[in-house]
Amino acid sequence: MCAKTKKIIHDTSHITYESLLEGNKQFIEDTLNEDPHYFEKLANGQKPPVLWIGCADSRVPANQITNTAPGEIFVHRNIANMVIHSDMNMLSVLDYAVNVLKVKHVIVTGHYGCGGVIAAMSNQQFGLIDNWLRHIKDVYRLHADELDAIKDEQERTNRMVEFNVIENVYNLCKTSIVQNAWLNGQPLAVHGWVYSLSTGIITDMKVSAHNSEHMANVFKFQ
Ligand SMILES: [Zn+2]
């Protein structure tokens, strides 16, 4: 079973431009068989209670791993699930999710074995992406004492993935978007999760925040 699954994931030669469109036809047929009004209902609008900020990695799709359906999770993905304050894409998604959709939860989800984190922990140059990865190196610097003390490379990488999630949850809390929601009494919680590619298990980093009380004073807006 495992070997078969692995083979399917690693052999993507059956995926072609045409096969995607064929897959769409099959999706429509299967969906309508189950619920003839599915698309009419979905087209009426969305009210997802959750914003997901995850990694672009093809193996971490928000809906599948949480057993949710289209319409239930608003999604933003980038390399290594980063919350960077000058990223207009992320800020626009966050602003729309919090202020228009009124999501109740924002979840930063990282994953063990994250290529972005591994690349950032190396000294290799990768080109343009180095400018993005530098934000991850900044996270490393904040926790360098603990990370440098971990001798096992995989263990050190895993811990770095966790720190990267924790710092990006904190970055969310620093945004005026999240803080204004809290100041206005809007129910909004931010959370940090790490997904294991090898087991499918999501681990809660237990850094959930519902207000700015835990934050360093310099970041608190009034
Ligand atoms: Zn990743």
Image: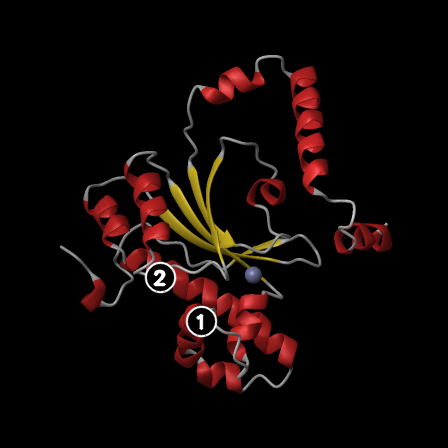
How many C-alpha atoms fall within 10 Å of the one at disc 1: few (<14), some, or many (≥20)?
A: many
Q: Using the numbered discs, state the Cα–Cα distance from disc 2 to disc 1 in whole angstroms.
A: 10 Å
Query: What residue lies at 57% left-to-right and 35% top-to-bottom?
Result: 68
| Label 1 residue SS | helix
- In primary-sequence order, the first of circles 2 and 1 is 2
Residue 180 is left or right of residue 26, and the answer is: left
| Furthest residue in direction top, as rendered | 36
59 in relation to 80, above or below = above
Give residue 112's position: percent from left, percent from top: 60, 64
Query: What residue lies at 63% left-to-right and 15% top-to-bottom?
Result: 35
- Residue 187 visible in this rendered orientation of the protein: no
Amino acid carrying mark 1 in the image: Ile
| Label 2 residue SS | loop
- Residue 148 visible in this rendered orientation of the protein: yes
| Furthest residue in direction front, as rendered | 18
Question: Which quadrant does ligand 1 occupy?
Answer: bottom right
Picture disc at residue 84: 2
Residue at mark 1: 136
Picture disc at residue 197: none
